[in-house]
Amino acid sequence: MKQDPAGRRNPLLEDALSDFHSRHAGGGSPAGEDSGEDRVYRVLFDSILEHRLTPGMKLKEVPLAEAFGVTRGVIRKALTRLAALKLVSLRANHGAAVANPSRKEANQIFEARRLVEIALIERLAGTLSARRIEELHAFVRAEQDSYDSGDMRSGIWLSMGFHIKLGECADNRVLSDFLERLVVQTPLIFLADGHGHPGRSCSAREHTEIIDAIASGDPKRAAACMDAHLRHVEQSAQPRRAEQKSELSLLLGLD
């Protein structure tokens, strides 16, 4: 994925990532302290959301410990933090693996997101200051710039960050924490169903429409924009298993 010549990312994105990981430290090292556990957690987190580690892939402690140059205990702590975000599944006698959401689980995630985010957007309509509105627009501009430059990693993070930022605007830590956990699970759904990155399916245009609806002070319009947007994202994640079966049939000469 493309990055700028110096390897830097958008400062807005860096701040959002730092804030997110600090909130989900899970009793690990203090914010800003580059511990072995933090390093393992962040590398695995990025690798899962960027689909370098695919759903269902085993995450064995010994090879990971050797790769990172840390103890198995450090690996175990990092995996526990990722499991709390439902990015990793931990099963007795089976070890750890990248989460592999079923179609039923994917539907439940989107249903929960609609319930939470539509209620959230209705609450925010007409209540945000001009400064807050501009912060949201800045996220969308950075998101669009990232996709336009081919930096899918930053674009996906900013797409998710926009929804997380809305949760922060509600000034309800319980609500925003729940929403964050739903949002970060969404990219896994795309690969589990035979898709690549969600990318522009979570489009800057739709995000802008949501911001405008919030600024207008019309709760119904805001709710309708969010509902349409989330259904669009969900539709783009519908499984392609039937298509894959047809391709296999062709290869085997059964069609």
Image: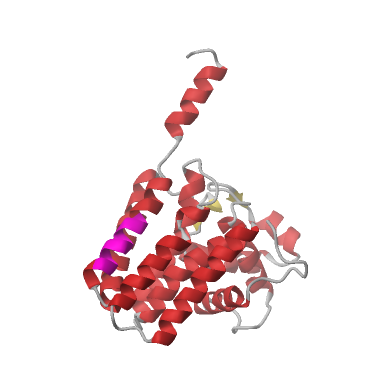
- Tell me residue 76's x, y (percent): 59, 64
The residue located at (25%, 67%) in the rendering is 221
* Left or right: 59 as drawn, with respect to 126: right
Is residue 5 at all visible to an observer of this figure? yes
Residue 71, quarter of picture: bottom right
Q: Along the line of sight, which residue is nearer the eye, 167 or 21?
A: 167
* Left or right: 126 as drawn, with respect to 102: left
Q: Main secondary structure of the magenta part?
A: helix
Q: Along the line of sight, which residue is nearer the eye, 211 or 172?
A: 211
Q: Residue furthest left?
A: 220
The residue located at (47%, 62%) in the rendering is 204
The residue located at (45%, 33%) in the rendering is 241
Magenta residues, as a range?
221-230
- Tell me residue 49's x, y (percent): 56, 58
Q: Quadrant of the N terminus?
A: bottom right
Number of numbered discs on residues = 0
Is residue 90 at all visible to an observer of this figure? no
